[in-house]
Amino acid sequence: MEWDAGVLPLNELALLPLSRLANMVRDRTLSPVELVESHLERIARLNPRLNAFVAVDGEGALAAAHQLERALAAGATPGPLCGLPLTIKSSIDVAGMRTESGSRPRALQLAASDAPLVARLRQSGGIVLGNTNAPELLMAYETDNLLHGRTNNPWDLDRTAGGSSGGESAAIAAGLSAGGFGSDGGGSVRVPAHFTGICALKPTPGRVPATGHFPPGLGPFALIGVVGPMARTVEDVALLAEAVAGPDPGDAASAPVPWRRPAPAEVQAMTVGYFEDDGATPVTPETRSAVRAAVAAAERAGFATRPFRPSGLERARNLWWVMFGLAGGFVIRPTLPSDAQDISPILREFLGIVAEEPPLSPGRLMDAWIGRDELRLALAAEMREVAIFICPACSIPAFRHGEREWTIEGATVRYLRRPDIFGYAQWFNLLGNPALVLPAGWSGEGLPIGVQVVGRPHQDELVLAAGAAIERQLGGYRPPPLATA
């Protein structure tokens, strides 16, 4: 039987939703080999401008595609990710690939085996193209390091694609990858998705195994850090999440919560809350407009909506900083080189901000831990009648490389200082809620603006179902100019 990709040129095929691509490979209207080749061609052509990749395994990806093609021809039953060319953040183990987390002391370190989520992707038919760039030890909202340099945003090469999963977001937005996985300890899949116009889920801790990630999910990172799917549509994010979800004995947060597909009536019965700002941190007018557009889309999709702003958000941000900034800094210090010149400037910047505060004491850590649980219980009570809510993902769209200060609604805000423009994402790492980002608007400069859809812990599937309904009303992903050049 001849493979037939139809009337679409291969260059445009790379921008289709991964769910459609998998169906085309499954139906044998598209060769998995041609699909991988089209992505490798785009990587060769566009990655020099984006610098999204740490490593590309073209030979291995093509070998896997040929093997799948033979299996399909022999009548094998394909998996849900049949033939999809995927990427993985370079902080997650992929056998034989560099797992450096952007840090010189880990230079050329190769993973001995696949992380469980990577093994599950392969078992589901996914093909790993390579792994993607991240800031050193993931401690930044901008992707740059001394090993691999700076990743650029496909909407504007002078702007960041975000961090710490910036390489992943840039690759997916530009069609160099059909989808993939990043990690998120303070917005690190959601802020890059917001900056590049794609979708990403920060799952409830334990729903997606974080085993095989560096830094490891232990101590404070087990409480706030997760690994999450990134793709161009909410449906694709859900497809990736379902393919890898499930308990794993190597994940300290793992729980035996099966993935499910909620009934349409259950989804439609939900009340959707919303707020435009937290009352402390300003957002741009276009960010407010994006939230309003998402709320209007939810109403058109049939959801009841109501204003809803959880209490204790500023306290949540402060406690997140104790867990991520102070405790996290304590955890990563032993991995740092003795020569400060071997530390990336953006990591030195982060460590400098941490050093401005007194050293973390056991009492402060315990107070933060107890305070976190108090806030989680309070939010659970407040969400008894509001199943999900919509809010900003960040105060601003993608910023220019190296920018550290902005004026928003007459107020000056600075990078990683209170009021923190990234606090809108950080709350939900502390509180453990699943949070989805999807594109909902545009800045005056034509940059994408995402919003968050947040749900109750362990109700990730409802968040995705509601997000998909809202996305259908908004129109979803638009390719950046670079992707169609």
Image: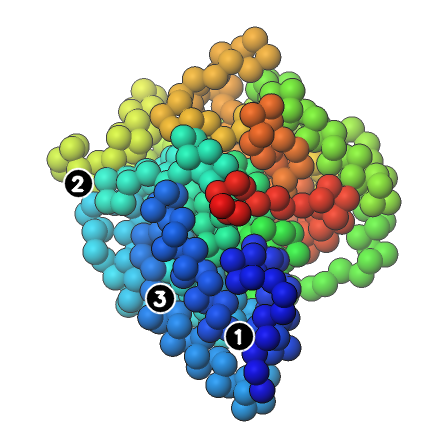
Instruction: Please provide percent x and percent y for residue 124.
Output: 53, 73
Position of the N terminus by quadrant: bottom right
In this rendering, the label closer to the viewer, 2 or 3? 3
Secondary structure state at the residue bearing disc 1: loop
Q: Amino acid at mark 1?
A: Ser
Looking at the image, which residue sits at the far bottom? Answer: 74
Residue at horizontal 20 percent and vertical 45 percent from the top: 104
Q: Position of residue 438 (x, y in %)?
A: 63, 43
Determine the image quadrant of residue 301: top right
Q: Amino acid at mark 2?
A: Pro
Labels 2 & 3 near each other (Cβ < 8 A) = no
Number of the label disc, if any, that sits on residue 99? none
What residue does disc 2 label?
A: 337
Which residue lies under the disc numbered 3? 58
* Viewer-proximal residue among 54 and 47: 47
Observer-nearest of 359 and 150: 150
Q: Which residue is at a point 16% across and 33% down the rendered structure image? A: 341
